[in-house]
Amino acid sequence: MDSNYLYYRLTRLLEREIKLHGRFLAVIKEQRELLTKFRVAPMEALDSRREHLAADIDQAHKERLGLLAQVEEARGKKLTEFVQEYFPAKEKIVLMPLIDELKEVVAETRVQSIEYQSITNFALNMVHGSISLLWQATQNVTRSYGRGGKLHESYSPTRSRHERVLKQA
């Protein structure tokens, strides 16, 4: 494979991956802000955008791996090692900062994704807890002790509070 073509394609793929990760980070940050304010309506569009960006990132990564698989000298090596050994100094000056930037943005993407997932789980647990409390408030709880002192609880639905209120005295 031509060295100039490889350099050009690798440079473009690295720049594309960096841009995609940057967009992905922007979407995650926007979703996190909306989630902390419990604004659900715009979240669906952002979820869709995030899924498309994740697919685009995966595609760009596979393209880069496919390009490098065509080069015998790149097999079994990390990208940094390959660039250090294969390209002349002039091209290394351009590629190495791109590789470092890609590493940083990938690490940041992982951290932000984990934080977003934690916030999402926390919000879902809050909603689940609220629903559970509301559901339990509509239930009669009958507690009894069985053999060995074990506590048994049974729930039976109750009527609405409005049905129990005396309307006339």
Image (tube, helix red, strand yellow):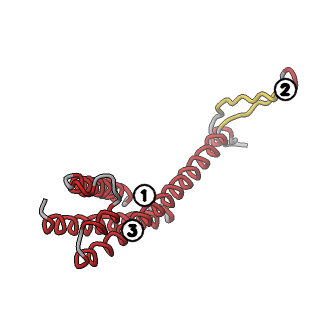
* Residue under the image location 57 percent in, 46 percent down: 128
**Three-letter residue code for mark 1:** Val
Neighbour tally class for label 3: few under 14, some 14-19, many 20 plus, Cα within 10 Å: some
Relative image position of residue 123 (x, y in whole percent):
54, 55
Residue that lies at the very extreme toward the top in this rendered image: 147
Secondary structure at badge 1 equals loop
Q: Which residue is mark 3?
A: 105
Nearer the observer: mark 3 or 1; the answer is 3
Q: Quadrant of the C terminus?
A: top right
Q: From the image, tell me which residue sits under label 2.
A: 145
Judged from the image, the secondary structure of the residue bearing numbered disc 3 is helix
**Alpha carbons under labels 3 and 1: distance apart:** 27 Å
| Residue beneath the point at 83% across and 27% down | 150
Whole-angstrom CA distance, mark 2 to mark 1, is 44 Å
Q: Which quadrant holds residue 27? A: bottom left
- Give the position of the N terminus as an image quadrant: bottom left
Residue 132's image quarter?
Answer: top right
